[in-house]
Image (spheres, rainbow, N blue to C red):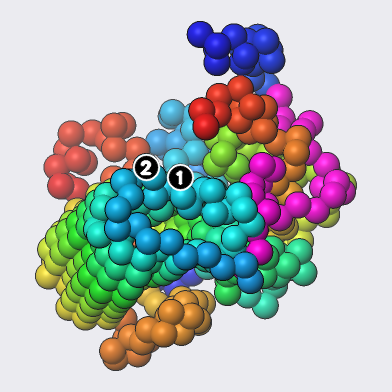
Amino acid sequence: MALRTKSHDMGMHTEKLSGRTQQRFFSPEEEENFTYPGAYDVDFNKRAEFDAANLSTSEINLKLRELMKAGNGTIVMKNPGAKHALAVGILNRLHLHVEGSLGYFGCGLIDGPNIHIKGRVGWSCGENMLAGTVVIEKNAGSTFGAAIRGGDLVCKGDVGARMGIDMKGGTILVGGRCGAFCGFMMQRGRMVVLGDAGKNLGDSMYDGTIYVGGKIEGLGVDAVPGEMTDLDCHWLERKLKQYDMKAPNGVKNMTKIVAGKQLWNYDNLEPSEKKLIL
Amino acid sequence: MAQKKEDVDKFLKESGLDTAREKEIGQHIGYRYDVNLVPDYGRVTPFLKKYMEIMGWDDLNWLEDVHMGYEEGRAAVFDRNINGWVTVPPNIKLPDNQQDRDMIARELLIKFQMSKKHPMVDLNKAYRKF
């Protein structure tokens, strides 16, 4: 296969990967770069619009790529028609405005763009998101921000179940309520719910922080209340203000949930210890 | 639960095997830094301010989750793109607090990831499909 030959030619299959530091590739004094090598050079002041009504998912995503390649730093997508997997895999700085709703798996695997969605989103919006901001004006479906690694994922309405499942970083902000099992197996990052949270919140969470402004129907295994610090309050105030959101009873009265850390190193626990936790 | 005052050099000076379980398995359990520590924006460096401006962000965004860690007794920052640690050059003096160390780690990580010498550049050339 051509691709395999290319990587073999480049010596990628013979070099030793163990016992070396990655520092050899890197000098902190080299020229300052703020975007990935190979990223499109875009200007936020250069604006383009397109109508997605009669385009397929692939055509829409390719259109976005073409517009970025042409230097457009602000793109308006009209009539997305709730198609699935739109605006995915964007590894570029960009302002994208979506005038409508997205279907399943919208804005997945993005690294850098700022996306504003006027409508709703289906399941798994922002899945595996790495960096950037996604702001949804209405509601979002289940598994919102599944396995998110970084960035701000904001829904101003309500969100379904299993939000932030397997979350490994980043911030999820919800203006309304969220369903059951949110923060399931969360490993790090921050989740902020200004309304009520469903049952089994933070079930089996390893680390990370959940802040809730309303009532919590029930905590999951190993999710325990934590103490709000001044640093938490300052961070929450700043972050919420950034997205024109406000905690109904003030950030100081929000409930903080953290990992009890009893499940850490679970495989090495004695059966009696496992029973105590579960 | 009050915030614990940990020795900032703990993982530079010792193995981090504190509990009986850790000694038994010979491995530190959990992260080697406080993953829940949110950044103190009063300590953002000029480089990071410029990065935020270029990306069009009002804050550190994904870098809020980047902390200085410690690998094999050396200060290092984890690069998710290579799934490995990048050690901090020895000529960089480490500040005496985690917040300032985290800012240095964020700056170094951006410089490393955006460098034309980053390993992903070669991988991109070899495997990019479109």
Percent across and percent down for residue B36 are 47, 61
Residue that numbered label 1 is attached to = A62
- Quadrant holding the N terminus of chain B: bottom left
Q: Are marks 1 and 2 in contact (CB under 8 Å)?
A: yes
- Please tell me how many numbered marks the rendered image carries: 2
Residue linked to disc 2 = A58
Q: Is residue A103 left or right of residue A73?
A: left
Above or below, comparing residue A65 to residue A49 in the picture: above
Q: Which residues are magenta?
A: A20-44
Name the residue located 69 percent from the left edge and 15 percent from the top edge: A10
Task: Specify whether residue A42 is in view.
Answer: yes
Three-letter code, disc 2: Ser
Q: Residue at x 41, y 85 (%)?
A: A244
Q: Is residue B34 visible?
A: no
Q: Which of these two is toward me, A5 or A23?
A: A5
Residue furthest front as drawn = A54
Cα distance between the residues tagged 1 and 2? 6 Å
Residue A253 higher or lower than A192, as above or below: below
The majority secondary structure of the magenta stretch comes to loop
Is label 2 in a helix, a strand or a loop?
Answer: helix
The picture quadrant where one finds residue A170 is bottom left
The residue carrying pointer 2 sits among few (fewer than 14), some (14 to 19) or many (20 or more) residues within 10 Å by Cα, namely: few
Question: Residue, x 74% and y 42% (percent of image)?
Answer: B115
| Residue B119 percent location from the top left of the image | 67, 31
**Foreground residue among B63 and A123:** A123
Q: Is residue A210 left or right of residue A201?
A: right
Name the mark on residue B119: none
Query: Is A229 covered by the magenta stretch?
Result: no
Instruction: Give the residue at x 54% y 48%.
Output: A66
